[in-house]
Amino acid sequence: MNLIFRSKLQEKHFNYKSDFVHNLFSTIAHRYDLLNTILSAGLDSYWRWCTVELMSLQPGDSTLDVCCGTGLLAIEQARLVGLGGSVTGADFCQPMLDIARTNIAKTPYSGINHLVNANALALPFPSGSFAAASIGFALRNLPDIRATIAEMTRVVRPGGKVVSLEIAKPTLPIFHELFYIHFNHVVPIIGRLVSGSEEAYRYLPQSLQPLPSPEAIRHIFTDVGLNDAHFVRLSSGMVTVHVGTVKSSQ
């Protein structure tokens, strides 16, 4: 297969997946937060808290949340950087950003949370713009995980953290089996009942199949130039938080 043909196939795949994910999340934006709370048995708020704690944020910091969705992770970051800081949420799905704007308006941090319609693969920010960057439950939806982590690394200044919160596949046999029963059979039913879109939540278990293992994602963090790449398993391995530190030479 020649390089030009392979490049065209890759571009077609990227565009198809981007369009599909955009349409899917536009459909479920109005019920996204409720569904996440139900499907995670309320653990989603704890996972976000743990993620932000691992970002090593300080009061006054400027941070970025990539694929920010409805803004809940960005709001959690605002809690730590305070009113003297700044949190930017970037997402390419406008209906999700509309919900994020409503969520942020209910908090004391509406003045420091900024929303931008942007693609994770081409972030519209200068290099070294932020003290840290996060992404939550989105790597599996992106056509190029490595390029996304590389872009996040680019816009974080030396010494800052790049952090990813993502669903994972539990390693303990009993949790492994329960996990797949839940996501393959329970999730689509609840998704249809609450959001009216069973297709959207059938996509969730499908999206996990090609997702790299936590160990493989850690290697991606290292390959793009992050120091001390590691991950923390939460809730018996149902989710993992990956953390890397931007090198001083970048």
Image: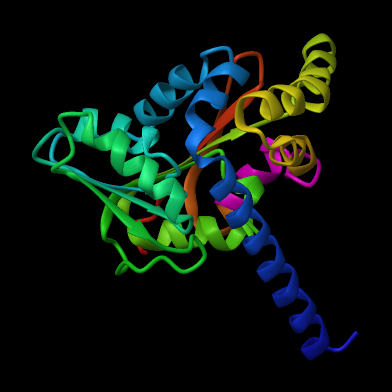
Of residues 67 and 82, the one nearer the viewer is 67
**Residue 214 lies within the magenta run:** yes
The vertical placement of 147 against 90, above or below, is below
Residue at the left extreme of this rendering: 84
Q: Position of residue 242 (x, y in %)?
A: 53, 37
Of residues 231 and 65, the one nearer the viewer is 65
The vertical placement of 236 against 233, above or below, is above
Q: Position of residue 51 (x, y in %)?
A: 43, 29
Residue at 52%, 15% in the rendered image: 43
Residue 127 appears in the picture as rendered: yes
Which quarter of the figure has residue 71? top left
**Residue 196 lies within the magenta run:** no
Which quarter of the figure has residue 206? top right
Residue at the right extreme of this rendering: 1
Residue stretch in magenta: 208-221
In the image: residue 81, left or right of residue 142: left
The vertical placement of 83 against 239, above or below, is below
Residue at the top extreme of this rendering: 174
Q: Position of residue 12 (x, y in %)?
A: 74, 75
In the image: residue 170, left or right of residue 40: right
Residue at 13%, 40% in the rendered image: 60
Residue at 46%, 62% in the rendered image: 151
Q: Quadrant of the N terminus?
A: bottom right
Q: Position of residue 179 (x, y in %)?
A: 77, 19
Residue at 57%, 63% in the rendered image: 147
Asked which colour scheme the image uses, the reply is: rainbow
Residue 157 appears in the picture as rendered: no
Magenta highlight: main SS: helix
Q: Quadrant of the C terminus?
A: bottom left
Count of numbered circles on the image = 0
